[in-house]
Image (cartoon, helix red, strand yellow):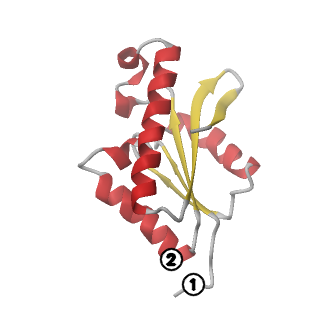
């Protein structure tokens, strides 16, 4: 059953307040404002990998698809994420960047197993002097 109100995507981002304004602007720039279910929780993609939160995260994707017919899952992880222990734990920027890309690849696998019909889009954000910098990650 298809609802009369549909959207293109679900956007999952970290709940970290430092990124809220910049991510909202990025979502708008991507044409997703008003066309996506927007959810935020600690670690963004980490919730799809952690046994304690995986069922909840997957249920949110399932509900978005069931209720709103979305066909894309956008996950925005970020540098210096406290849910992962922050930059102090993850090392230099290049190491942390590589780690986050690997995490997003794992999320892609989990989502593809459960939702092979949905498109996965991955991003990595970081705080910058000009606000928030977001890069699309090709997996």
- Report the residue at 51% width, 32% height from top: 78
Q: Residue furthest bottom?
A: 1
- Residue under label 1, please give it: 3
Q: Quadrant of residue 90?
A: top left
Residue contact at pointers 2 and 1, CB within 8 angstroms: yes
Q: Quadrant of the C terminus?
A: top right
Reply above or below: 89 against 124.
Answer: above
Q: Residue furthest left?
A: 52
Q: Residue 96 location in percent, x, y?
A: 46, 21
Residue 67 badge: 2
- Report the residue at 65% width, 23% height from top: 128
Q: Residue 18 location in percent, x, y?
A: 54, 34
Q: Residue furthest top?
A: 92
- Report the residue at 59% width, 26% height from top: 127
Q: Residue 130 location in percent, x, y?
A: 72, 25
Reply above or below: 128 against 138.
Answer: above
């Amino acid at each position: 059953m298809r609802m009369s109100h549909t959207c293109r995507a679900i956007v999952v981002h970290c709940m970290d307040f430092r990124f809220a304004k910049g991510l909202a602007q990025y979502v708008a720039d991507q044409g997703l404002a008003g066309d996506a279910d927007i959810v935020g929780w600690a670690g963004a993609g980490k919730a799809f990998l952690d046994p304690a939160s995986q069922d909840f995260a997957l249920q949110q994707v399932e509900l978005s698809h069931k209720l709103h017919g979305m066909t894309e899952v956008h996950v925005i992880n970020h540098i210096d994420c406290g849910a992962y222990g922050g930059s102090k734990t993850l090392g230099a920027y290049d190491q942390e960047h590589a780690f986050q890309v690997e995490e997003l690849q794992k999320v892609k696998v989990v989502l593809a197993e459960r939702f092979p019909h949905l498109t996965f889009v991955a991003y990595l954000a970081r705080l910058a002097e000009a606000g928030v910098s977001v890069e699309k990650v090709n997996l």
